[in-house]
Amino acid sequence: MAQAAIELIGINKSFGAVRANRDINLEVTRGTIHGIVGENGAGKSTLMSILYGFYQADSGEIRVGGKPASIKTSNDAIALGIGMVHQHFMLVDNFSVLENIILGAESNALLKSSITKARSELDRLEREYGLEVDPDALIEELPVGLQQRVEILKALYRGAEILILDEPTGVLTPAEADHLFRILKQLKEQGKTVVLITHKLREIMAITDTVSVMRQGTMVATRETSKTTVEELAELMVGRRVLLRVEKGEAEAGAVKLSVRNLTVKDQRGVTMVDDVSLDVRAGEIVGIAGVAGNGQSELLEAISGIRRAVSGTVMLDGKPIDVTGVADPGELRDRGLAHVPEDRHHVGLVLAFEEHENSILGYHDKQRFLKGPFLNVDAIMADAKDKIAKYDIRPGNPRLKTANFSGGNQQKIVLAREIEQDPGVLIVGQPTRGVDVGAIEFIHKRLIAMRDQGKAVLVVSVELDEIRSLCDRILVMFAGRIVGERGPDATEGELGLLMAGVEQQEAAQ
Amino acid sequence: MSTPYAKLPAWADYGLIPLINLSVAFIVAGLVVVLVGENPFRAAVILVEGAFGKGTGIAFTLFYATTFIFTGLSVAVAAHCSLFNIGTEGQAYIGGLGIALVCLSFDATLPWWLIFPMAIVAAAAFGALWGLIPAYLQAKRGSHIVITTIMFNFIAASVMVYLLVGPLKPAGSQAPQTRNFLSGAELPKLNWVIELFGAKIRSAPLNVCFLLALVMAFLVWLLIWRTRLGYEMRTYGHSPKAARYAGISETRIIITAMMISGALAGMMALNPVMGDQHNVAIDFVSGAGYVGIAVALMGRLHPVGIVLAAILFGMLYQGGAELAFEMPAISRDMIVIIQGLVILFAGALEHMFRPYIQALFASVSPKTVGMEAVKGKGA
Amino acid sequence: MDLFNAIIQVLDSTIRLSVPLLLACLAGLYSERAGIFDIGLEGKMLVGAFAGAAAAAVFHSALIGLGMAILISVAFAMVHGFASITHRGNQIVSGVAINFIASGSTVLLGQAWFKQGGRTPALQPGERFEAITWPGADAVRDVPILGPIYSELISGHSILVYFAFAMVPFTWWVLFRTRFGLRMRAVGENPAAVDTAGISVTWLRYRALICTGVLTGVAGAYLSMVQNGGFVKDMTAGKGYIALAALIFAKWKPVNAMFACLLFGFLDAAAIRLQGTPLPVIGKVPVQFMQALPYILTVILLAGFIGKAIPPRAGGVPYVKER
């Protein structure tokens, strides 16, 4: 019988009133890759942060290698041979790779010997696992995939026997992800234990030996990967059959409402994020953009909606140009009938510190019906907010409540209500249901389809393939800043997956 | 980042916690009094009696409060736009220059009620201009406004010293100040209002600026919570990204907020310059700008809170003067210490007691602490 | 030769005037590199100056004075740490508070204890740090050029002056060659990286603030026990803020900090020297302009017109574990 590397027994953790982990039991076998899946907010990261000593459990027991362990700080975890690769890398950007690796693991008060030692140790790790990286490069000059490699090296340098990876592929290109998986398999062969946290079922099926499913802070099941299916895991994750298809009729696409031609956008570092993209959205259709996060979708939406400046290209709204390279302004675009539900509702779409009714006019606060001269027309704003609360079943239905106190789904409804109720001709939506509970997902999808049926043009960006496939009439796939293919709603997941991975890039370009 | 602290009922948030913080500041101040060998309880009695015991004391208290209402509002307006205007001191100083120019030009020819509005405009305009440059540098060049406004305080001091020992000093005078204004530039006193209530006032500088300060407090409330501009400032203050999304121009909102803040700071100069000294002298602001930070923090950036906090600080100033007179071991510097302690406990350490109070509330009645708050987070 | 002597004199006073700036600037460097903004340098220098002069006068010992200056200054630094590290308060607000408390308490206690209007008693020989004459300084005084440079500029300063300049390479060494320096720089850039590496962010930042306190204490002691023979009300007179400006001007680097402080010290020395004397071409420069120049230069630098000053990324933000 294989020995358990980690045992968690009865772990509980609350943040204020939120119970992030309830009575969790978990056993991870030595020398295996163990996946933990669950939706956003299911409590996976919290659990692993407890194991890594970043948080303290309120109650419960941790055993490492069969012995009870008290993990009060990350130091304790490191000493027990536990290493963690965080979702947001814990690297100092303007330090070199070497400096990052020795940080916290210096051999004595002077750096010289640590640096020498780390250099030869890196050499060894490079040979053993193929983890190549220039030890003197600055982190901020490395691509994301290499930064992640530095994180893995950091853990190995500290002698980690158990490696926890938190959503490691979210920021990776498919090729980088494949490379990562090869590395993880190699680590397993060397006898290391890997815990992989993700919400992507395909990854779980591809690489893990065992999988545990979390839902709303509880551990609902543990399965041998070879004896389970994607469908079963999906059901366990959400607790009931996923609605893969929302009922909808055929699209009756009309005139082109939004037309993008040769749009190129760079980010603040000067890296091209959107590369010569052209697309059309017609009245009465929903166009979806699928792709792995970070392939330029966010920048595309920001450029079209006037938040980010494009380098070159044109965008036409109802046949008239939007000055995307110059002075396009989100406020002006709203006047012209372009509404935008942004990806990041916490920092962009909403002001969480505002009361609900204040957010229900964000972006439309300069409209005459909400104003009396330079003053806000509070009565009109409140009446309008109450109206939307009723129409969109926003709970709790109190326009005076602070927005931060609404759940993710209800916050998203506040944004959607605001944007849809302005009756825009074009609606662009980023990640319509990220962090939204299942009930609200269905509601939101129905709303978007209703928009379409009223003859509006809808552009949706989502990293959830299921969502794209069930919602959209046409699917564009973005990879490395380019549109690499267009498919109908009946495209298979595999077909889209290959496009998203950039495999069929050449073929699609023809 | 999520709020690190759960919700408390409003009365605890805006009443109980500031009160506890303030009490701790005064307890520590009491220890300082013990350290210099005096009785802190007697000192407290002298302080309060000095501030409110007699009509003259009340008038002085309100006179000082007037100054602090202006500087507190100035800091608060900028803070609502998430700008830390530490330059209120310099903006007030330069505001004094605007007043000097108006008064020195017209005090011989015009009555006070014509000079006063002109001086208000001049003070506001000069203060606003002194706030404009750091605002522009923040908005356009990304210079940290805290640092630039500190630098501008010192530059303002140099400019004013240069002018007051040079061009603005009357020939033959030794003192680094302008000539005294004629009666046309003297503001009417308000002491008769207090006398209506039966108190006697010997001579105190309380003047119409107090009413102006109250009007400004009301206007600031209107601005922040009832106008489109205030809405945009608060949006930017909470989330610059949301402001960008909502079509609010970053440059415009930063510059507007800082100019309003600077204008309020500049208007502070009206009170000592036209209401009391009748000249512009070196260092007449004497730290009132920095006190504004304390007042704004104590008042939780709300005009009502700011007026109350300003009166508290006015009381410290006036009562502290009496204290220095009654207790020789305690000089007026005691006020500076108390101010510092209030800034420390009500400002920098404002969250120190919050967890305990929350625990207390949670144990007494869990519902009030917003148990259903913040779902869908974590992971 | 007159001009040469004048230059030597200006440079000599440049050194004397830049020492407190340099000490305070390096002090600020430790805390800001660790991610704690510190506009309370002024206040900590002031309490250091007071404690130093008071203790030296009472115990008749310069060393006890210095020790006391450091102790009290560190205590104030710990208050800043308590507010801004432990309780995650606003660092600017905490700095302002410290400056207020320092300004008030030094005068109040000075008056209560010594009854000289807030001053401390004039320090006697032995209670101050005396100038050290280097071997041969008198002998070579008359050698042209090099003589005065050696005897005036290099020799003839108090031990604290040499300490200040020695702190420049030392600070560089600490920052870039020691474990503490590596961790300190890391915590000012990305405290989460330090935390997950198993190092206490809190303790690390407190240690950086202790360094700050020690150096501001020495800076204060220099003011009251070397430059002046005792404590005078508000004797720091904005030097803490100039040091802050110098720190930005130096882009948070130790060697740059020395040059920035020497530049600002030189401006001060030149302003004193040139008072009322017209310069060729420019004419008479108001002394206030010279005094404001450090601030003006810093603003211009901050505006990005001469290079770009990028502060430590985590500066001013209290560290909260992300949820």
Image (cartoon, coloured by chain):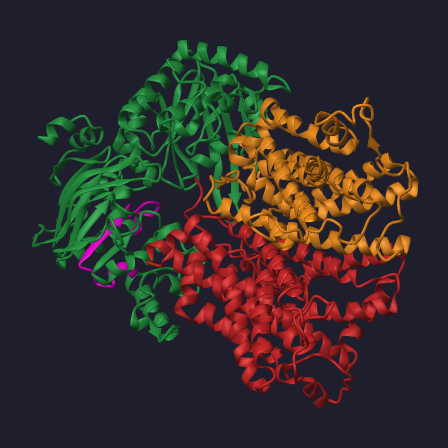
Chain colours: A green, B red, C orange
Q: Nearer the viewer, residue C210 or A34?
A: C210
Residue A146 image position (x, y, % from top left): 38, 24
Q: Nearer the viewer, residue B30 or C270?
A: C270
Residue C95 image position (x, y, % from top left): 65, 49
Please tell me in which quadrant of the rendered image residue C165 appears.
top right
| Picture layout, residue B158 above or below residue B322 | above
* Left or right position of B73 against A288: right
Q: Nearer the viewer, residue B310 or C129?
A: C129
Q: Is residue C165 visible?
A: yes
* Left or right position of B172 against A31: right
Q: Nearer the viewer, residue A250 or A335?
A: A335
| Picture layout, residue C26 above or below residue B213 | above
Residue at the (44%, 55%) spot, across then down: B136
Residue A482 image position (x, y, % from top left): 20, 35
Residue at the (28%, 53%) spot, across then down: A341
Q: Is residue B350 visible?
A: no
Which quadrant: the C terminus of chain B? Answer: top left
Question: What span is in magenta?
Answer: A418-440
Residue C103 image position (x, y, % from top left): 74, 54
Residue A425 lies in the magenta stretch: yes
